[in-house]
Amino acid sequence: MKKLILLTLLPAFTWGQSKFAQLDQELPTPNEYRTAGGAPGHNYYQQKADYKIDVTIDDKIQILSGVETITYTNNSPDKLEYLWLQLDQNLYEIGSDARMIRLEKMEDFRSIEDVERNLFYYEGGYKVHEVTSTSGGKMKYFINKTMMRIDMDKPLGSNSSISFKVKWEYNINDRSKVGGRSGYEFFSKEDNYIYTIAQWFPRMCVYNDVEGWQNKQFLGSGEFALPFGDYTVNITVPSDHIVGATGELQNMSNCLTATERSRYKEAQSSDSPLMIVTPEEALEKEGNKATGTKTWTFKATNVRDFAFANSRKFIWDAQSVKQGDRNVMCMSYYPKEGNPLWERYSTKLVAHTIKTYSKYTVDYPYPVAISVHTDRIGMEYPMICFNGGRPEADGTYSEGTKYGMWGVIIHEVGHNFFPMIINSDERQWTWMDEGLNTFVQYVTEQEWERGYPSRRGPAHLIADYMRGDKNHISPIMTNSESIWQFGNNAYGKPATALNILRETIMGRELFDFAFKTYCERWKFKHPTPADFFRTMEDASAVDLDWFWRGWFYTTEHVDISIDNVKGFALNDIDPAISKGKAKSENVKKDQTIGEIRNKESIKETVNERDGDIDDFYAKRDIYKVDALDAKEYEDAMAKMTDAQKELIKSNKNFYELTFSNIGGLPMPIIVEATLADGTTEVIRVPAEIWRRDEKSVTKVFIFSQEATSFRLDPFLETADVELNNNSFPPVPQPSKYDFYKEKQSRENPMQRDKRVKELEKGN
């Protein structure tokens, strides 16, 4: 393929355009804490919160009770008059804001089941028994819904620490009735529980240079902003329960049998999953419940949160993954109801995710990574996550169930990196953890299986959302609690935007370097959107303000059209060529309906009957090359230099294309030209072509032969929402109209295959 010479015909400059204006006014002013290049400043600080916790799960009445000692270190230059803690379980109080602001309609109460569900009573929320100093003195505190303020006797000075104790309890929620990220699942046939426990202890809020205390109320969508610290947690549960948690188990000899410890040691050097608690052993525990309790002690260093799961139903497998000079234990905990999917895939997915994310972000710094099976939600915490994906009772499953399980495990394990390590403010900006994580999830999925049907990432998958009703679409830069279409806005669109940056705007090498630079700069720190935007430009030398502005600050969409094409060739100066082309085009000229019908209805015209009607003009051949044409051509060629003559003979073909930006979102113009010999050439014009005129531009493309057609966005990489205006000559796109289909059977293909084999065996 020959290199193309591109000529640009710029429209007149128009003042007042804004799509390519810099983001200076939108972004906060750089300072000593955060630099103009997007890196932590020379006086960057962050607070530290260390926890020592004793927690007990009462398996008979499903109550969690605990006492914690928090040591809070003020590394800021400010004196703090009070401290703020998060009480996330208060979301479940009857009169909570989350319940009161929920939109409801009469159709939500049409059946008795609807009424029962909406009026279900659950006594949720924390019961805070006391807050005391470490010496036992009572401390003043005030609970404001999901936040608790602790009033100190005197301000906490810079570079000072304070320790205090909190004693509390709450009723653990049944996720099947109440929902939620944390809770229990009850197995009625065997009277057993699986507990997946998170947001379970009063947690310190973030205090930083950006907003002071991040103490926005928890309304359900905006997740968690948390400081880093060290944890020692003693978890008391029924003695036959297996516990998986953030951190490393400290008292293995007290909690595991000799056989289990031996298996664990073997798994520490295995590159494939090995059983620590087998299905048979877990099944035996289900039917023979032990009495008494056991305390498991875990320690975790430099983490922002702590979660755990426990059950006598747990099967447990593990393998090791090398990370630098360390080994990471990748582990899964799941009941028999998760098999055969979980035993076959879960831990392998954990290991793959740790390796792939480490390649694109930062090396995984923690000693373990855990996937726990639940019936419903996927949710993430440091070193541990809760994931759905349950087969049918007969052990079969659909492809949707399999890919759903694969995707949620990759996604939730990936959250170890965003926001557990690169610790953004989820309460304010959901996209900074969900969007960035979904992008790396897409890359990880593609490295797991070639052609993996990723739900989010490829540009064309976001087109339907972006063309939708703008009254129900929010800019990405919207607070977590105010987002319309949460999944598309916070997961899909930012992930797509990053994929477009990587594949189309920047290229993989530049993008990967800049993205990894951002991750390295902000690991174990609190980045903001400005830090991300600035680092991506700082590390790549690519001006992306127009991209952030369009994709993150507006709801505009991509719709670029080809409006017109004009063409000429350099050798058209030769009359034999130019008149031949004109004659050929005249022959191909479309006939009007009148001309077609007149051939039948008009048997003979006047000039066909009367030979005296046709004069000079009617008889002359306008396509004939006469002597004067030839002489004028020879004279013109004689005046040219040898180089100009060679250029004329090179048969260069020029095409002026006119493009319109109908959707408003500027993007590169990617044109695929099909040439006369059937080959194609792709030309990529940077988005900056729209900088002088945001609505319409023209550009001249030059080829060594004639072009027969042009197509915009041939690889579906810009999220163009309308493909019917992307081709010249126009090419109609397939209709998205779905014909009525009979409701499919609930039988999955694996179940059908079993019946087929049984039928064949019977024959």
Image (cartoon, rainbow, N blue to C red):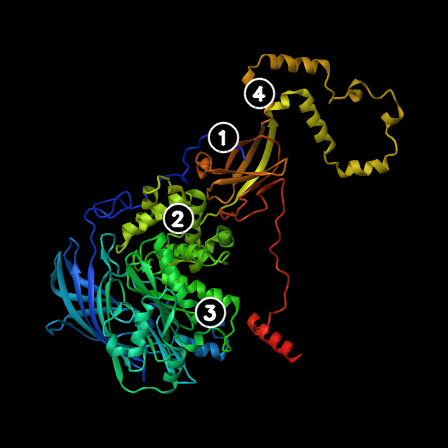
Q: Which residue is mark 3?
A: 105
Q: Which residue is mark 2?
A: 553
Residue 116 in which image quadrant: bottom left
Element assignment for label 4: helix
What is the spatial separation of the Cα atoms under label 4 and label 2, in whole angstroms? Answer: 52 Å
Can residue 219 be seen in the rendering of this structure?
no
Q: Residue at x 49, y 56 (%)?
A: 450
Marks 3, 2: nearer the viewer: 2
CB within 8 Å, label 4 to label 3 = no
What is the spatial separation of the Cα atoms under label 2 and label 1, in whole angstroms? Answer: 29 Å
- First in sequence: mark 3 vs mark 2: 3
- First in sequence: mark 2 vs mark 1: 1
CB within 8 Å, label 4 to label 2 = no
Callout 4, which amino acid?
Glu
Q: Nearer the viewer, residue 592 or 588?
A: 588
What is the spatial separation of the Cα atoms under label 3 and label 1, in whole angstroms? Answer: 57 Å
Counting from the top left corner in percent of width and height, residue 576 is at 69, 21
Q: Which residue is mark 4?
A: 646
Q: Nearer the viewer, residue 84 or 732?
A: 732
Q: Which residue is mark 1?
A: 8
Near mark 1 (Cα within 10 A), the count class, few <14, some 14-19 or many ≥20, is few
Callout 1, which amino acid?
Thr
Can residue 82 be seen in the rendering of this structure?
yes
Marks 2, 1: nearer the viewer: 1
Could you say which disc has been placed on residue 403 in the image?
A: none
Figure quadrant of the N terminus: top right
Counting from the top left corner in percent of width and height, residue 664 is at 48, 43
